[in-house]
Image: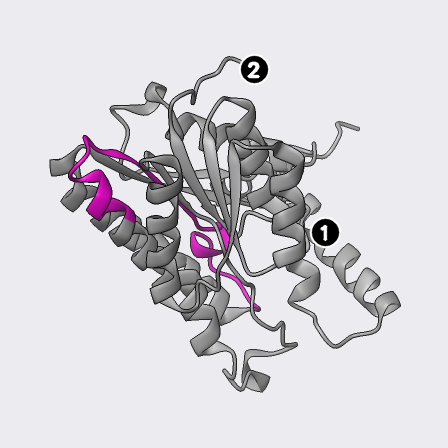
Amino acid sequence: MTGELAGKVAIVTGGASGLGEGLVRRFAAEGAKVLIADIDRDAGAALAADLGEQTRFVEADVSDIGQVSDVVSAAVEHFGGLHVMVNNAGVSGTMHRRFLDDDLADFQRVMAINVAAVMAGTRDAARHMSEHGGGSIINLTSIGGIQAGGGVMTYRASKAAVIQFTKSAAIELAHYEIRVNAIAPGNIRTAIVRKSAAGEDLERLEQFEEKIRAQMRADRPLKREGTVEDIAEAALYFAGDRSLYVTGTILPIDGGTSAGKVIVRKSPT
């Protein structure tokens, strides 16, 4: 590691597991002090204990935007500042076989976590950064917000909203030397696909997940599997000083999936 984030303070929401944990570990390895915000008290506390004094865990439910503000205040008070804000916390919503069967019962929850919390985290971090020389805000969207498709309609709509918000915030906050960018992961193996099929038994869940993963592989030009580390590398670029002239960017990390359909070429006979 190069110490690229030495001297910087970062917040990662949803940082106790999955993509968030990967970002926390990479930021800490690069020298940052990291505040981990998550609703999962046990996982968050365990991660902070594992990484030591340069990290701190704060239990927070970002669906309550007041708690998002408290997270920003906690980072500033404990570490003395804030340079990087990662709005990573997100939920997928419930997978339905058909949109016609979707009762939209989870709409408010998905939008509260995936959109309102991102907006509040950006605003609250920017309030501090605007008076302290700027900083970097990184929002996690998804290729589901770039590409149209069936299933999890509320999730897709929420992630599309994050993209438009990120670009708009980048324009307004550039005046304060605050960069706002987004990462759009695709086909990264985390628990979010499984969570979208809650209520099924374990065997059916595994079958469901493998079916989705197989379709993802078929649609992906690059055949290697994406990893949490791939997302962490992109976040490191946006967080550090290599990206001082980069804002309003939506970066897909998806093996080329959002670029277009795979062309199947037949072997000459």
Q: Residue at x 24, y 24 (%)?
A: 245
Determine whether the residue tagged by mark 1 lies in a helix, strand or loop: helix
The residue labelled by disc 1 is: 213
Q: Is residue 269 above or below residue 100?
A: above
Residue 189, percent from left and from top = 68, 46
The residue labelled by disc 2 is: 1
Q: Amino acid at mark 2?
A: Met
Image side of residue 121 versus residue 109, left or right = left
Q: Nearer the viewer, residue 250 or 268?
A: 250
**In which quadrant of the rendered image does the N terminus lie?**
top right
Residue 126 lies in the magenta stretch: yes
Mark number for residue 35?
Answer: none
Residue 18, percent from left and from top = 63, 47
Residue 101, percent from left and from top = 59, 85
Residues in magenta, as a range: 125-151
Q: Residue at x 38, y 27 (%)?
A: 8
Colouring scheme applied when the structure was drawn: one colour
Image side of residue 73 versus residue 10, left or right = left
Please identify the residue farthest to the left as the structure is shown: 175
Residue 77 visible in the picture: yes
Please identify the residue farthest to the top as the structure is shown: 2
Q: Amino acid at mark 1?
A: Arg
Residue 221 visible in the picture: no
